[in-house]
């Protein structure tokens, strides 16, 4: 059976996931996956930890541990936070020999087909440590926006930098270690070789990219396209490169993303018989969607696409890249090093999960930076969600004298229910995907359902049932309770009758005795 593969950006296991991460790709991917499943579409929602990243080295050194130990503890914390937030990702698969083989099976055919080219490049070099620096091991001046940036790409402007592109490079592990540059021969994959395919791809999917991401892609395409490192000198961590021309080097960690996603999909699907990459084959009929942050547009939106295109017509390419901006905490960037963060698991231990998911959806950074405050969470969810929701539950309780009674639905009730469904479907579809509008739709419909008079009780319940089905990807617990009580969460608005039901209340208010019927 064909379906949709939803991939959230692979988290680097150098710490737990905080609320800023959750409000980005993980919640968005979860809500889209839940929407598709509710509509009857098979979905595999997967990712895995990005263990090979150089950030593992720098973070482990800072905390006096090893990258392997840091991976183990952080992966467990990430899994805990994902589950606590109700993110319907498949369990994080192990980064084991099977994973490493999947990576090699993906890159080796490209090497054998001559897709990679040898280049002698200059890279930053830490003189005292005697090591080459890249990505999370080096900081310097971004050549595109002049702000401080790590290697690989700039978190601020999103533009790539490789090799000796950074100005005034400095070692992250030891800022006092003098940094020079030295020549080294590596394998690369020239993105310029795929300019025609890239241009056609972006033109065909322009309506699924948000404005800032489209702008970045246009800016990168307006210049000579970079060369993707395939191998880099080994820092003592990563997957050894199997190529004779680059002894002692590792695979560049960012090129693992596609085979990692393929491996994660295979594991999430229960390790079906046949090739590990079967679900990603072009002939599978599956569709593919990525969810990630703006700072990963270059890697997930261009590098990973080229890695797929380099295989010819073997693989699917993503129908959409849904990208978010940065989410701040109290108007400052989330920072693990300064302990300026709120972990997702800690937050839902204090606040009912539906309220957290609703607030993150309402305030998530879709098109510009957004801000999280605990005061805002408490105030907004109480005033705009919990109180009106429970008032609507009170109204329905006063109206329904016999739960399970079959009630008539008029043409007007069916029409209004269909309008509700269409409004929410527009928020969940990829061409107009917006969690903020979906969460705002919950607010709007609550207010309307609470105050508008209905001649027929069946009409109100038909609209409320449709509203519940539309809110279910966000409000997972209260809608699951409704289903457990026998409410059919369906977007079929054509029924002429409906069984009477009571609306479960959101936590935080005192339940009346009658609400437990």
Image: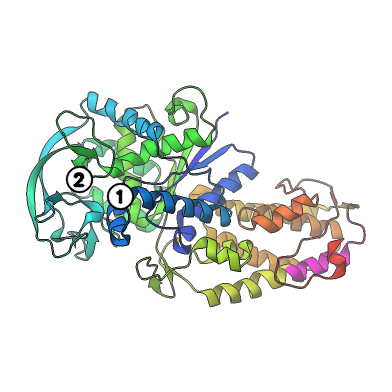
The residue lying at 54 percent from left, 50 percent from top is 30
Residue 109 placement (x, y as % from top left)? 28, 25
Instruction: Say which label, 2 or 1, has the lower sequence index.
Output: 2
Residue 108 placement (x, y as % from top left)? 28, 27
Residue position for label 1: 298
- In this view of the protein, which residue sits in the foreground, 492 or 177? 177
Question: For residue 391: magenta?
Answer: yes
Quarter of the figure that contains the N terminus: top right
The residue lying at 70 percent from left, 55 percent from top is 479
Residue 477: image tag = none
Secondary structure of the residue carrying tag 2 is loop
Residue position for label 2: 226
- In this view of the protein, which residue sits in the foreground, 134 or 424? 134
Q: Image quarter for residue 419?
A: bottom right
The residue lying at 38 percent from left, 65 percent from top is 336
- In this view of the protein, which residue sits in the foreground, 103 or 156? 103
Secondary structure of the residue carrying tag 1 is helix
Q: How many marks?
A: 2
User: Cβ–Cβ below 8 Å for labels 2 and 1?
Assistant: no
> Considering only vertical position in the picture, is 379 above or below 299?
below
Q: CA distance from mark 2 to mark 1?
A: 10 Å
Q: Image quarter for residue 457?
A: bottom right
């Amino acid at each position: 059976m064909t379906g949709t593969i939803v991939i959230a950006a692979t988290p680097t296991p150098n710490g737990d996931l905080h609320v800023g991460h959750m409000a980005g790709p993980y919640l968005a991917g979860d809500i889209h996956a839940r929407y598709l499943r509710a509509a009857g579409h098979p979905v595999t929602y997967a990712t895995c930890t990005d263990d090979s990243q150089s950030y593992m080295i720098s973070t482990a050194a800072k905390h006096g541990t090893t990258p392997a130990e840091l991976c183990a503890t952080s992966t467990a914390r990430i899994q805990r936070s994902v589950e606590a937030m109700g993110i319907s990702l498949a369990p994080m698969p192990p980064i084991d020999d099977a994973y490493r083989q999947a990576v090699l099976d993906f890159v080796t055919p490209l090497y054998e087909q001559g897709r990679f080219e040898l280049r002698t490049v200059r890279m930053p070099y830490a003189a005292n440590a005697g090591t080459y620096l890249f990505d999370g091991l080096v900081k310097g001046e971004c050549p595109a926006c002049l702000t401080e940036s790590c290697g690989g790409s700039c978190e601020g402007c999103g533009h790539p930098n490789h090799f000796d592109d950074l100005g005034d490079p400095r070692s992250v592990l030891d800022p006092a270690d003098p940094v020079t540059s030295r020549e080294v021969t590596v394998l690369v994959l020239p993105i310029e070789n795929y300019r025609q395919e890239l241009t056609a791809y972006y033109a065909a999917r322009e309506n699924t990219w948000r404005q800032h991401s489209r702008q970045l892609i246009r800016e990168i395409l307006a210049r000579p396209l970079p060369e993707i490192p395939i191998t880099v000198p080994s820092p003592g961590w990563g997957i050894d490169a199997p190529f004779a021309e680059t002894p002692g080097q590792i695979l560049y960690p960012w090129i693992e993303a596609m085979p990692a996603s393929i491996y994660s999909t295979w594991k999430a699907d229960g390790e079906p018989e046949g090739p590990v990459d079967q679900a990603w084959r072009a002939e599978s009929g599956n569709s593919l969607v990525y969810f990630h942050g703006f700072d990963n547009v270059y890697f997930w939106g261009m590098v990973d696409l080229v890695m797929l295109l380099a295989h010819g017509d073997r693989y699917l390419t993503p129908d959409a890249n849904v990208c978010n901006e940065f989410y701040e905490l109290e108007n400052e960037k989330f920072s693990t090093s300064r302990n300026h963060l709120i972990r997702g698991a800690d937050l839902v231990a204090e606040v009912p999960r539906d309220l957290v998911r609703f607030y993150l959806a309402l305030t998530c950074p879709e098109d510009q930076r957004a801000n999280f405050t605990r005061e805002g969470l408490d105030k907004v969810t109480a005033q705009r969600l919990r109180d009106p929701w429970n008032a609507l539950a009170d109204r329905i309780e006063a109206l329904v004298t016999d739960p399970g009674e079959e009630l008539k639905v008029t043409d007007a009730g069916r029409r209004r229910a269909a309008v509700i469904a269409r409004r929410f479907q527009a928020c969940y579809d990829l061409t107009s995907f917006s969690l903020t509008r979906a969460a705002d739709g919950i607010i709007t419909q609550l207010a309307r359902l609470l105050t508008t008079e209905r001649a027929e009780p069946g009409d109100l319940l038909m609209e409320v049932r449709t509203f519940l089905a539309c809110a279910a990807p966000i409000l997972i617990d209260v809608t699951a309770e409704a289903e457990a009580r026998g409410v059919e969460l369906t977007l079929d608005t054509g029924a002429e009758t409906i069984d009477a039901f009571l609306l479960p209340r959101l936590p935080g208010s005192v339940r009346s005795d009658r609400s437990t019927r």
